[in-house]
Image: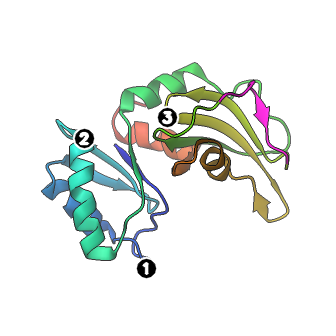
Amino acid sequence: MVFYRSMNLGHPGSPDRAALESALSAAGARGVKSFQTNGTVLFEANDPLGVVAEAAKALQAAAGYTEAAMVRGLDLLVDVLDSDPFDGHEDSRTYRKTFTFFDGGRSIELKLPWTNAKDDVDIVELREGLALSIIRKEKSNAGSPTAEIERMTGVPATTRTLGTIERLVKAAGLG
């Protein structure tokens, strides 16, 4: 599967669902299913990284989309969900539980759980290319684990909620 950064299907600078699915299929993906409108796509491929790299050319041509894409396997998400990483970290201020995907960049060295200076993001677990966080929302502003991870690593990141990940795994027939 692939998690695109800053994609909003059908909006300026992003492809529509048909263009997104077509680009991945033409690049060799099978069983392509765009999930929601945020650039989360379930697919199968012998070379998922190669498929996403090839599809990027079509997405740029079709919609001018040039943002990062993070490819992950379902096994990672199932493993994370099975480990219940948010247990014991929630409180009455919890707004969302999130998965933030990133590739490369500077190493993150934190004592976990870690809380940002604004007290609206707690990173509770780090895995290679994945930060699991709890965010809080004061008034209309929610914490941004994406911004925190991008600041720490210097590379693009993208975030999905726990609910999105749970629905994605279920749609794949594993949840």
Q: In the image, is residue 80 part of the stretch drawn in magenta?
A: no
Q: Judge by depth and name the residue closer to the eye, 73 or 35.
A: 73
Where residue 106 appears, x then y in whole percent?
Answer: 56, 37
Q: Is residue 94 left or right of residue 104?
A: right
Q: In the image, is residue 112 part of the stretch drawn in magenta?
A: yes
Res 134 seen here: yes
Where residue 40 appears, x then y in whole percent?
Answer: 41, 52
Amino acid residing under circle 2: Pro
Q: Name the residue located 52 percent from the left edge and 26 percent from the top edge.
A: 80
**What is the basis of the colouring in this image?**
rainbow
Say which residue label 1 marks.
Answer: 12
Say which residue label 2 marks.
Answer: 48
- Image quarter of residue 140: bottom right
Of mark 2 and mark 1, the one earlier in the sequence is: 1
Of mark 3 and mark 2, the one earlier in the sequence is: 2
Where residue 111 appears, x then y in whole percent?
Answer: 75, 24
* Magenta region, main secondary structure: loop
Say which residue label 3 marks.
Answer: 129
Amino acid residing under circle 3: Gly
Q: Residues within 10 Å of mark 2 (few under 14, many from 20)?
A: many
Q: Name the residue located 77 percent from the left edge and 24 percent from the top edge.
A: 88
Amino acid residing under circle 1: Pro
Q: Which quarter of the image is occupied by the C terminus? A: top left
Foreground disc of the pair 1, 3: 3
Given contact means CB atoms under 8 Å apart, are the residues at marks 1 and 3 in contact?
Answer: no
Q: Which residues are magenta?
A: 109-117
Task: Determine the CA span between mark 1 and mark 3.
Answer: 28 Å
